[in-house]
Amino acid sequence: MLKKIYTQNFGLVGFYLVIVIIFSVLSPVFRTPGNINNLLTGFSHIGILAIGQTFPILLGGIDLSVGAILGLVGMATFDLMLIFGLPGYVAIPIGLLVGLLAGLINGFLIVRLKLNPFIASLATMASFRGLTYAISGRQLFPNLTVLAIQDPTYLAIDGTFGFIPRALVYLLILAAATYFLLHNTKLGMDLYAVGGNENAARLAGVNVNRAKFVAYLISGLCAAIAALILTSRMTTSPEGLGIGFELSAIAAAVIGGVNLQGGSGSTSGPVLGAFLIGTIYTGMNLLGVTQYAQPVVAGAILIGAVGYDQFVKARRKKDLQEQLLLQSLHQMKKGG
Amino acid sequence: MNKMILLQARAVSKRYDAVQALFEANVEVYAGEVHALIGSNGAGKSTLIKILTGAVLPDTGDVLLHGNQIPHGDPKAAIDAGIACIYQESNLVPNLSVMDNILLGRQPTRRMGILDRKAQRARVLDLLKKHDLSLDPDAVVQSLSTVQQKEVEIAKALSLNAKVVLMDEPTAWLSQVEVEKLFRSIRKLTADGDGVLYISHVLDEIFTIADRVTVIRDGKVVLSTPIGETTKGALVQAMLGRQLSSEVSTLRREKAEKQIGPVAIECRHLSRAGLFQDINLQVHRGEIVCITGLIGAKRTELVRTLFGAEPPHSGEVLIDHQTVHIRRPLDAIQRGVGLIPEDRRRDGLLMNLSMNHNLVMGFLPLVTRLGLLAPDLVRQMGQQQVDRLGIVPSRLEIPTRHLSGGNQQKVLIGRWLAGNTGILILDEPTVGVDVGAKADIYKLLHDLADAGAAILIISSDMEEVMTVADRILVMANGGLIASFEKGEMTQEQILNAASGELIK
């Protein structure tokens, strides 16, 4: 399986290694264990969002609302614990449910009302964010702004197992589970079928609507998990939590080889993509690149990564075509 | 023969907006028979198929299998009941493997929906062996050739173990050898007591394979008879509601020496690595040249290169005796070359735009005033072509996707005529086009040639080649291997040449 993941993301792995080597040479801090730890923890949530985003994109859709769902879930658990005084082990499952519910709403708009995914999730992005402000305990009770989450169960979310950051563990488990789902289950095949040719899938008796609901539910759930990690880490939940995260998640997924037209890609690539983005930002911070220039450089590097990946794929496709041609020539000779 | 009715469509009707696509149609498929369904484009065959497979909801009427009613508009119910279909357009998922496509939506699973790959592979291999199909189960479908993809579709339909298999023009993209293979599979099915509903434009095929035939015209069943009790002429007449067979044969082009003018387009030693090599050909003004050959002979690649859609590696192209450098289609268009591609939905038409848009889009500068589109000129140009080509329905605002295949093809031809294109290249111009529109298109091509146009046609349809061509070139394995003047060849000779057996 590892080999398959490697070959699927061949260009990307190579590019990532090059970036790591460059930063390691340029910045002595970059290659310290502390920084590597930071890297692995600091961008796990983007990786998780990218895994979630993979599913809508795989179906030719998109979920722009993941950043807003993240904010909403964070605020919901914050309220539950600090306003209602509920323990963390109650707040956590409710938080996950909120994420699923948000995904369900997206699914309803897209499947039942047949709205374009871009428009539907753009609308829910605004609505969820508005709702986050409306229910903000920090707005309703000004003293809460300075109060931190103290529930031990909740704070344990972002702890470590020994020296391994838990956020990274969640990410790897999620990546493995979704990879298994996509490649080894009937549901996974249905997702690829719907993304690749919706009409063919429908005519073959695939439950297209269920596949779409599942995609947005997974996206919502992943946003909720990311929310729990981040709020546990920050011990609070600002109203603006997660703004702009959807862009990183989409970028990570696309860099990771998920085709925006749907039908192809997996969850291993997007995780790599998230770390690539994270590594670039961290590296630039350490090199003292100004905040304003960072997005520009990051954008340029991302284009390079996607471009290189496309180049590798195009070359492989060409090889394949030539093989096909040789084969058919061979057959013709035999036939003639 | 056992006369048990397997599948029955009873008084099925369907209306799309203003068009009555199907009206009270009755069709029965008996066990162990091949039932052919024929009719012009837009006659309602595809609508009927879609109703039978549950892809479309009928307005009224019932579909019965073994006398049991099948729920309407539910593809899964139809599949479960035992109705399989090979659709005309591709219904494969390009990113999935052959194995997954064949058992799409029905992959065997173990507990909790986890795939049982071993069982799946065994079933697929078994099926491929049984029907003598040589496909790699792990190959990704998009890496396969068109013919292989069609084989995957056939395997997919056969894998359902259906009682009735519907086939909507299954041979449109197959070569002779593969058609015979398909026929063998069909005979295997009927020998097992299954029924086949077979749609085709090719009457020869129907007389080879079918036991009974039903003709649909304008959404109504006009004829249903055992194949032995009818003739080609009678079928054509039923399809068209008029005598046409003779009309088509009078279309056979008589060579008129005087009309052949100077060379319009010529290529010398044209090659593209791995595709075709050292192609030399000339098309004169007033001449129709056909390139025929088997699928995979790289004919399409050759004309795409002539048109500038793909660059040659070596060789030169001359237009009106002048060497030209054609790097993109626009260069070719500006020199008066037009290409009508093989896949008109994918490469030709903007299906969601109106007929009028499609007719003028190649030559917008001709319908502008001061650089702005002039609606009256646009309409005028569109109307001219609609009248000239006899496109029906004739309303210019109709979205192109609502037109039948034949009329769509006319729109594509009309687009080039609007710009007075003098060199016309047509790639399989009548695939999926009904007999009536075919005759119109042949006549149009003859008129164009007589008016001095140079016409190059790629065609796998032997009857078409024999009917329209002044000169026939045979291509195989990326090379031109034979050339025949009109009247000096038989169909058999051409076929022999195409399959690689050089006669001379």
Image: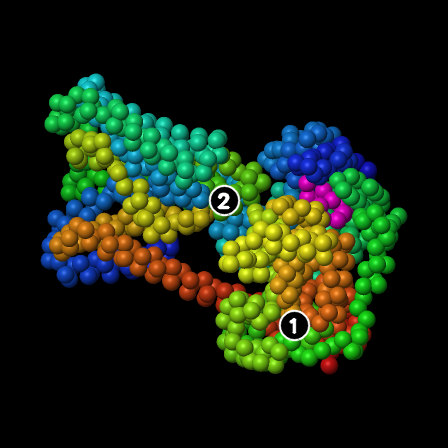
Residue A255: horizontal and vertical position, in percent? 33, 52
Residue B299: horizontal and vertical position, in percent? 62, 68
Residue B372: horizontal and vertical position, in percent? 51, 55
Mark 2 is on which residue type?
Answer: Ala
Pick the front one: B495 or B355: B355
Q: Secondary structure at mark 1?
A: strand
Q: Residue at x 76, y 62 (%)?
A: B443
The residue pinned by badge 1 equals B475
Q: Residue at x 20, y 21 (%)?
A: A140
Of all residues shown, which one is farthest toward the right? B229
Q: Say which quarter of the image contains residue B323.
A: bottom right
Q: Magenta span covers which residues?
A: B31-47
Can the viewer see residue B116 in this picture? no
Q: Residue at x 19, y 48 (%)?
A: A39
Can the viewer see residue A187 in this picture? yes
Q: Residues within 10 Å of mark 2 (few under 14, many from 20)?
A: many
A54 relative to A299, above or below: above
Image quarter where the C terminus of chain A lies is bottom right
Q: Which mark is residue A193?
A: 2
Residue B274: horizontal and vertical position, in percent? 52, 72
B360 relative to A108, above or below: below
